[in-house]
Image: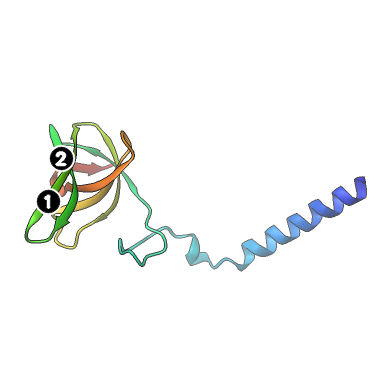
Amino acid sequence: MRNLKRACVAALLAGTAAGLAAVPAAATVQSGSGTIGDPWVPTRAAHITCETATLFGNYTAGQGHSDPIATLVRGNYIGVRYITADHNSADVFWHGTSKWGFLLRDCFALN
């Protein structure tokens, strides 16, 4: 039984090492374009800097925000997924209620 456990652990370690060696270095870099087709778009830590900021369900460049979801206050922590191409809004995750939405770019700062 003891030899079987050793053999299993050795096989697991060998498989893990081989698996790590097969992962290209570029795969460990966390970046994303913010598009739906992007396989991994991490959030960056940020906080609200405006006295109050509305989290919206939608944003259209040139037209603005629509469909308010919630009101955040100065100091609330958020995760920023991406900033829109026109730099007026950002897709964010509000940790307080676990909701995604769009927020005016001028109302947060990256940590």
Q: Quadrant of residue 60?
A: bottom left
Q: Do the numbered discs 1 and 2 sit on residues whose CB atoms are within 8 Å?
A: yes
Please tell me whether mark 1 sits on a helix, a strand or a loop.
strand
Look at label 2 and name its amino acid: Thr
Q: Earlier in the sequence, mark 1 or mark 2?
A: 2
**Could one spot residue 50 in this view of the protein?**
no
Residue position for label 2: 54
Residue nearer the viewer, 103 or 70: 70
Residue 24 vertical placement versus 67 (above, below): below
**Screen quadrant of the C terminus:** top left
x and y percentages locating residue 78 in the rendered image: 29, 40
- Checking the image for residue 65, the label placed there is 1
Residue for point 13% across, 54% down: 88
Residue 10 placement (x, y as % from top left): 80, 55
What SS does tag 2 mark?
strand
Q: Nearer the viewer, residue 31 or 93?
A: 93
Q: Position of residue 87 (x, y in %)?
A: 15, 57
